[in-house]
Image (cartoon, rainbow, N blue to C red):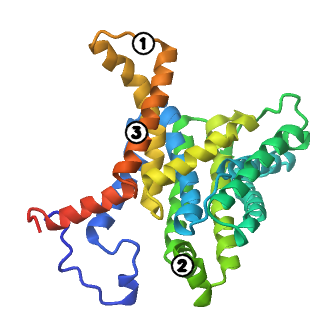
Amino acid sequence: MFYRENGQFKTSYRADQQIFPILQDRIAIALLLAIAFVAVPLLASDYLFRAILIPFVIMSLAALGVNILVGYCGQISLGSGAFMAVGAYGAYNIFVRIPGMPLVPALILGGLCATFFGILFGLPSLRVKGLYLAVATLAAQFFADWMFLRIKWFTLDTPSGSVSVSNLQVFGMPIESAVSRYLFCLCILAVIALLAKNLVRSAIGREWMAIRDMDVAAAVIGIRPMYAKLSAFAVSSFIIGVAGALWAFVYLGAWEPAAFSVDQSFRLLFMVIIGGLGSIMGSFFGAAFIVVLPIALNQFLPVLLGLFGIEISTAGVSHAELMIFGGLIVWFLIVEPHGLAKLWSVGKQKMRLWPFPH
């Protein structure tokens, strides 16, 4: 039995309320952090950082924010791309217009801009839900696309609408190399993921889940739906806004409003659905699936078809990648609608009982 829990007794409330109460989980998380912070920077190539690891870390952070709103509070949102755009442009204007503004406070203030934007478009959630709320949040996406494209003040009156940042520093240390960018994003992800894990275990997290399960019953037992829903929009928008600022500053460097289109909103929603709704770990699984799979298909599909003597053009690879990717999403949702996090929990349960079949 690889996952034996017997003999691990809790003698205090503090020990019983640990984030990882099982010793094996604590060891696994410590090893995972050691690999992410030490082994990966030493072993990974520059291409791996720029093409896979940095996008995966930032998208994991964005999926974490979406999961708080959609998975834990049950408020369907299609405006995540707009929240990322507000965070990116808010941080950009603060970083450029205020001389000597440090990078980290600019990212936090950009997240706060996204918070106010999310609360504004979260107000319809007090009256509508389900598909109607999804349409209301989709309006935020279209409004943000129009705002950053037409109001030139947000882009410092640049004719093309494209903006860029350079010479990024944190505490006097430049973050120009791929390794430094990866470590900077990873530190922010680790801090926010820890805070989010504690938040969903707290009283406000239980209020979110009560609203998700049945909002009428939650109101009957004394939970304020307005406070719970708007707080979920605020926290989710802040995390997504910080992720959008990182996506623009660290990953893209130069961007335009099309970088945060409605496609980005759908990608984030697919991440939390595939990874697992209402699961912090599911956000990481979903981000890995969405980020890594298209790159893997693009790299290995021509090689695989070449083994059978089939030649395929670059355009054909792109179309086949979209077809296979969409088919895998549909197949996965049919086979395991609760996401990859459910498979992870089932695997842990199997390890608790192995080698016994019962």
Q: Which mark is residue 210?
A: 2
- The answer to whether residue 202 is seen in the rendering is yes
Disc 1 crowd, CA 10 A, few/some/many (<14, 14-19, 20+): some
Tell me what residue is drawn at x 40 percent, y 81 percent: 17
Please state, as top left, top right, bottom left or bottom right, where the C terminus lies in the image. Answer: bottom left
Give the percent coordinates (x, y) of residue 12.
35, 90
Distance CA(mark 1)–CA(mark 3): 21 Å
Q: Secondary structure at mark 1?
A: loop
Q: Mark 3 is on which residue type?
A: Leu
The disc, 1 or 3, on the residue closer to the chain's N-terminal end is 1
The disc, 2 or 1, on the residue closer to the chain's N-terminal end is 2
Q: How many marks?
A: 3
- The answer to whether residue 184 is seen in the rendering is no
Q: Mark 1 is on which residue type?
A: Ile
State whether residue 80 is above or below residue 205: above
Quarter of the image where one finds residue 267: top right
Distance CA(mark 3)–CA(mark 2): 32 Å
Tell me what residue is drawn at x 76 percent, y 61 percent: 121
Q: Are marks 1 and 3 in contact (CB under 8 Å)?
A: no
Which residue, given by chain and number where applicable, does mark 1 sit on? Answer: 312
Quarter of the image where one finds residue 20: bottom left
Q: Are marks 2 and 1 in contact (CB under 8 Å)?
A: no
State whether residue 81 is above or below residue 238: above
Q: Nearer the viewer, residue 271 or 183?
A: 271
Q: Mark 2 is on which residue type?
A: Ala
Give the percent coordinates (x, y) of residue 76.
61, 60
Q: Secondary structure at mark 3?
A: helix
Q: Secondary structure at mark 2?
A: helix
Which residue, given by chain and number where applicable, does mark 3 sit on? Answer: 328
